[in-house]
Amino acid sequence: MMLELYHNDMSVCAQKVRLVLEYKGIPWQGHHLNLRAGDQFKPSFRQINAKGLVPVLVDDGAVITESNAIIEYLEDTVEGHPLRPVDAALRAKMRGWLIRLDAGLHEHVAAISFCVAFRHQLLQRYPDTEQIERFIDQIPDPGRAGFMRDVLPNGVASKRFSLALYSYNQLLADMDDALQQRAWLAGDQLSLADFSYVPYIDRLDQLQLSFWWRDRPAIADWLERMRGLPAYGTAIQQWNNNDYLQLMAGHGRESAPEVQRVLAALVTEA
Ligand SMILES: N[C@@H](CCC(=O)N[C@@H](CS)C(=O)NCC(=O)O)C(=O)O
């Protein structure tokens, strides 16, 4: 039976899973969810993932949630195009990169995306407080609902925004360090770590923040190599949603002075 993927065109963790599927040449059938319309809260999807989050992979009845668990599952079950280093130390390095996403970076990408751009989609779709509250009330995780109650009204003034910039600043320094030493994040071979981070760096670019790695050519070079892979075309470019891209570019430019201000303060404090 063909693998089924519940996903969203611009969701970073869904992009990550599509990249691995495409790189490995695995056929899959997609179910696309509109996350602004609230498809993730529909009972039919909540039966699949009670957390109301994408991506979800369904393989012959086995339901797998969490993007990192999904890509490891693909690595375990599909032969060919290995993406886990053989060397145990490099394998641990690769896992370290994956853990970093779950240990905060994923929330930080959401904070930057929502504070700068995505909040405008929801504020436009649900223009009065009651409508927006009804949308937020459907979010099963109280932590995530609290996140929305903060970022939607506060935008770049939210404390989460400066924390996210701080965390990304550290990430870029660490990526630069790794990529100056070896060709890929976990050594000399492409691994799950590289596929996992492309969407998180692309997102900064979409928000007009690529100046951040202007002085880090190792990151720019890595990004170019990743974007040159055929899987990037089929997993990312073919799914790019122009409305999202335009919204992020416009609001990204608008927020640039605030980003620069917060970053300058980080450098002074360091
Ligand atoms: N740790 C999860 C995070 C999943 C997640 O946050 N998914 C987002 C899209 S990137 C989502 O479904 N959001 C729905 C919502 O915000 O209601 C993973 O890696 O799969």
Image (cartoon, helix red, strand yellow):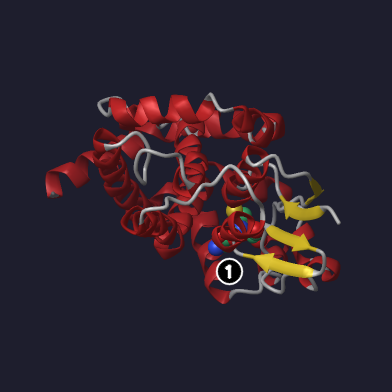
Left/right of residue 268 with respect to residue 110 in the rendered view: left
Above or below residue 52? Residue 14 is above
Quarter assignment of residue 248: top right
To which residue does mark 1 refer?
145
Name the residue located 53 percent from the left edge and 24 percent from the top edge: 228
Above or below residue 18? Residue 147 is below
- Give the residue type that dot 1 points to: Ala
Left/right of residue 136 with respect to residue 60 in the rendered view: left
Please tell me whether mark 1 sits on a helix, a strand or a loop: helix
Question: 127 or 9: which is nearer to us?
Answer: 9
What percent of the width, then of the height, locates residue 82?
54, 46
Question: 241 or 22: which is nearer to us?
Answer: 22
Quarter assignment of residue 10: top right
Q: Is residue 14 visible?
A: yes
Question: 251 or 188: which is nearer to us?
Answer: 188
What percent of the width, then of the height, locates residue 43?
83, 71
